[in-house]
Amino acid sequence: MTASESPSLADSFELIRSRFGDPDFLRCRGISNEVPFYVFPYDAACEDEVRERTAELVAASRAGSIPARIVDFDLWDIFCGICGYYDIVDDLERMERERGSEALLAHIRELAMPEDYVRAMRERYERDFGGMQAGRDVLLVTGVGKTYPFVRAHDILENAQPAFDGVPFVLFYPGLYDQTSLRLFNSVADGNYYRAFTLL
C-alpha cells in the first residue's frame, strides 16, 4: 500500500460513516423498488487497514456515535460455525490428503451452501440483536476473501435478498464491482450480479 492510498481509504470510511448516519439511507429511500443492497469494493492489498477501520466503525456504532445500529457478520466466522456444527473441523486435513483438494472443496460446498450462511445470519440477528429494526439497522458483511473459494459473493447476495430486504445490506468486497459483475482480488471472476448499488 502506498502513502497515497491511505488517505483515500480514510476518506472512504468517513463517507461510509456519513451514509450510515443518513436517515434516507437507513430507511432505504431514493432507490425506487430496488433491493437496498450495496457493495463497497476496495483494494485487497489494503485488507488489514479495512479490517481495522471496519472494527472502529462497528465500535462507534455500539458507542452510539453513529445513528445506525451496525449488525456485522463475518463470513469466515459463519463458515467455521457451520464446520463446527457438522463436526468436520478436525477432519479437513485428512480429507484433503485422502480425497484431494477438489473433492474436499465439493464436500464443503455441499455442507455449507449459500443459504446456510444466510440462515446463520438470520438466526444470529434474532438471537443477538432481537431482530430487524428498519430505519435503524445496517447489515455489514465482511470476510469475502477469507471464505473464497468455499462460497461466492454473488451467491450470498442472491440468497440474502428475500431474507434481508427491509434494511441496507452492505457487502465489503476485496475486488472490483461494476454493477454487473464481481471480480475478487481484481482478477478472479466471482459471478454476475446487478441488483446492488456501489456504496459510495
Image: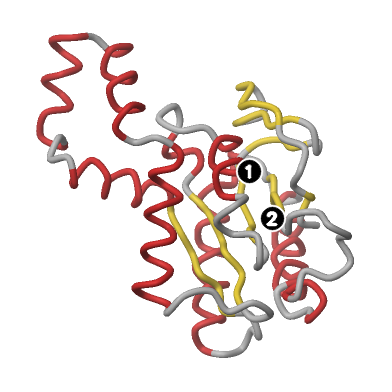
Residue at 37% in and 62% down: 123
Which quadrant is home to the N terminus?
A: top right
Disc 2 is placed on an element classified as helix
Residue neighbourhood size for the residue with mark 2, other residues' Cα within 10 Å, grouped as few (<14), some (14–19), many (≥20): few
Q: Earlier in the sequence, mark 1 or mark 2?
A: 1
Colour mapping used in the image: secondary structure
Q: Which amino acid, by three-letter code, is at mark 2?
A: Ser
Examine the rendered structure and indicate whether residue 32 appears above or below residue 178.
below
Q: Residue 26 in the image: state x and y as whole percent.
A: 72, 75
Q: Residue 109 in the image: state x and y as whole percent.
A: 36, 27
Q: Which amino acid, by three-letter code, is at mark 1?
A: Met
Residue at 42% in and 79% down: 130
* Nearer to us in this view, 59 or 26: 26
Per the image, the residue denoted by label 2 is 6
Distance between the Cα atoms at labels 1 and 2?
Answer: 8 Å
- Residue lying at the far bottom in this picture: please name it: 64
**Do callouts 1 and 2 mark residues in contact (Cβ within 8 Å)?**
yes
Residue 156 is drawn in which quadrant?
top right
Q: Residue 111 in the image: state x and y as whole percent.
A: 29, 32
Residue neighbourhood size for the residue with mark 1, other residues' Cα within 10 Å, grouped as few (<14), some (14–19), many (≥20): few
Q: Residue 83 in the image: state x and y as whole percent.
A: 23, 40
* Nearer to us in this view, 127 or 21: 127
Q: Is residue 126 left or right of residue 32?
A: left
Disc 1 is placed on an element classified as loop
Total marks shown come to 2
Residue at 64% in and 26% down: 191
Label annotation for residue 1: 1
Residue 155 is drawn in which quadrant?
top right
Residue at 80% in and 54% down: 34
Label annotation for residue 166: none
Examine the rendered structure and indicate whether residue 164 appears above or below residue 146.
below
Which quadrant is home to the C terminus?
A: bottom right
